[in-house]
Image (tube, grey):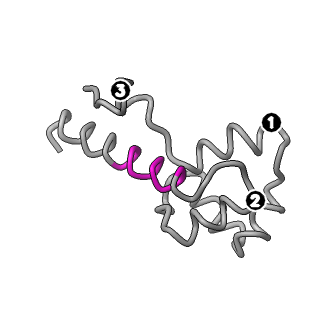
Amino acid sequence: MEDDIGDMKIHHSVAVHVGQFIDEVHIQEGHLSEFDLCEHMGWGMKEFDDFLVNKIIITAEIAEKLSEILLGSAKFYIGMQKNYDAAQARKEAENGN
């Protein structure tokens, strides 16, 4: 299933959670340490682990904190969360859940 986003078509399998994106693009590539992210966000390792496995929903407050330490605006991270949520809902609907 695809959605129109501007002139692009986005398939639900393309949508990723912010935690996965930050892990793959910033942490695994060495641009940001787990410690620095946790310290800036005020998280312990439990919250950090939850963030990486999509258990933390990106709120306006979290998005603002992410935008302070990473490239991208708060609006970018909120949009990514909305796209992820919509993709998950479509996936569940397609699977009859």
Query: Mark 3 belongs to which amino acid?
Result: His
Residue at coordinates 30% horizontally, 30% vertically from top-left?
4
Q: Along the line of sight, which residue is nearer the eye, 4 or 20?
A: 4
Residue 70: where, in percent of width, then height? 73, 53
The residue wearing badge 1 is: 29
Q: Secondary structure at mark 2?
A: helix
Q: Is residue 40 above or below residue 53?
A: below
Marks 2 and 1, how far apart at CA: 16 Å
The stretch of residues the image draws in magenta is 76-85
Q: Quadrant of the N terminus?
A: top left
The residue wearing badge 3 is: 11
Q: Is residue 83 magenta?
A: yes
Q: In the picture, residue 39 is in which quadrant? A: bottom right
Marks 2 and 3, how far apart at CA: 29 Å
In the rendered image, the residue lying farthest to the bottom is 42
Q: Secondary structure at mark 3?
A: strand
Q: Is residue 21 above or below residue 77?
A: above
